[in-house]
Image: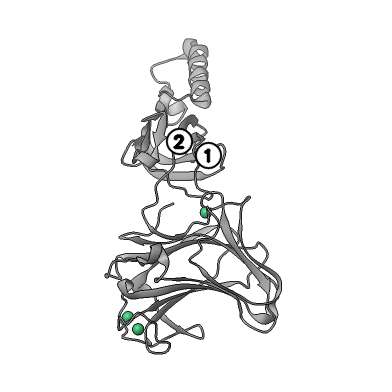
Amino acid sequence: MRLTSKIFATTLAALTIGFASCDRDLNPEGPALTDLYGTFKVKTGLVASQAQVNFANGESVYFTAETSISTDFVLTITGQTSGAIKRIEGKARTLDATNALWQGETSQFPTFQTEMCDVMLTYPGYPDTLYGSVQVLGTRIIDATILDDFENGMAPEWVKFIQTGANMKFTVQGGAPLAEGTSYYKMGGTVAWDWLIGMIEMPKSTFNSGAGFNLNSDAEQVYFNGVFRQLAGLDNAIILLQLREDDNGDGAYSEGNEDMWSVEIRPGATWELDSYKYSDLVTLVNGAASAAIGNGLHEPDKLHRVSILFLANPSSGYAECDTDMLCFTENAPLAL
Ligand SMILES: [Ca+2]
Ligand SMILES: [Ca+2]
Ligand SMILES: [Ca+2]
C-alpha cells in the first residue's frame, strides 16, 4: 500500500519551481540544490507493509520510508475510534521491520480497538511530515494469567471488603478516559477512622475454576502487572499489593508465619502500566521494608492469594483510584 504525503509532494513541487526559476542564474560555482535545502531529503515515502493487520492472528505490520541522511524519526499511530496512540521513535536513514515494527501495542492508553488508524511520520528539526493509514482487523492477544480485565463486570471470584464510609465507589466503570478495552474498576471513598478504604482479594482456591494461578516457580520469570490512575488533583491514594505464599503447602496461609510480598503503588493522574518482577517484591511492615515473615524465598508457584488494598491517610479526605488489566506475565512485563 502506497501512502500519501502532502508535505512531501508540496516540497517536491517547491523544489521543482525553485529549480526552474533559478535555472538562468545557475553557474558551476553555485551551491548544489541539496545544500540549498540542507542535506536532509525524503527519498522514499511512507509505506505500510500491509494495509490491514489482524494482531489477533499473530500478524504485525511495519513501515518503510527513506531519507538521504540518518535522522531522528517519530512514527505515530493513532486509532481513529479509540484515540489510542502507539509511538515508535528512533534514528535511521531507512525505516524497516527492524526499527518500525508494530505488534498492536499501545504507548498511550487506551488500547487499540478494531479500527482505522492514522499514521504520521515526522523528522524532528525538519518540516516534512508523511501520512498514511492502517486498519486493525483484530486486536492484540494478551499472553498473561489475567486476574481481571473488568470487560465482563468484575470476576465473581474476587472477595470484596469495603468499609462503611462516605462516597464509596467500588464498581466497574466505562467511559473515557479508558485504559484496556472499554471497562475498568473504580475504587473511591472517604474513611475518616482507618487507612483502609476497601480491598479486593483473589484466592488461588477459586481462581480459574479452582485450578489456581499456575505460575512459574522461578520468581525471576514472573511479573505482576496492572494499569492504574488516580483522580486528577488528588495525591493521597495508595494501592497496596500483597502476595501471600503458602510456604509449607498445607493449603492455607498462616498469618505471621509465611511470606507476604508487597508493593506500594501511588499512581499519577494518567493511566500507567506498572509491572513488578516477583523476585523484586519485598516484605513491608507498616510501609517499611522488613525481614521476610516466612521462609524468605520468592515462590510464585506457592502464591495463596492476591490482595489489592486501597488506602489513604484517614485525615486526607476523599481518595479515588482506577485500575485495569491485573495480570501475571512470564519472561517479560506486560505489553499492552
Ligand atoms: Ca478493561
Ligand atoms: Ca501454609
Ligand atoms: Ca516463600
- Residue pictured at 32% horizontal, 84% vertical: 296
Q: Is residue 7 above or below residue 98?
A: above
- The amino acid beneath tag 1 is Gly
- In the rendered image, the residue lying farthest to the top is 24
Q: Nearer the viewer, residue 172 or 262?
A: 172
Which label lies toward us, 1 or 2?
2
Residue 320 in view: no
Q: Which quadrant of the view contains residue 236? A: bottom right
Secondary structure category for the residue under label 2 = strand
Q: Is residue 113 above or below residue 152?
A: above
Q: Nearer the viewer, residue 159 or 334?
A: 159
Q: Residue 79 carries which label?
A: 1
- In the rendered image, the residue lying farthest to the front is 209
Q: Where is residue 324 in the image (x, y as percent from the top left)?
A: 52, 59
Quadrant of the picture in which ligand 3 is shown: bottom left
Q: In this view, does 221 lie above or below 294?
A: above
Q: Position of residue 288 (x, y in %)?
A: 48, 84
Q: Position of residue 273 (x, y in %)?
A: 48, 59
Secondary structure category for the residue under label 1 = strand
- The amino acid beneath tag 2 is Val
Residue 263 in view: yes
Q: What residue is disc 2 on?
A: 136
Q: Distance between the residues labelled 1 and 2?
A: 9 Å
Is there a contact, CB below 8 Å, between mark 1 and mark 2?
A: yes
Looking at the figure, which quarter contains the N terminus?
top left
Disc nearer the start of the sequence (1/2) = 1
- In the rendered image, the residue lying farthest to the left is 218
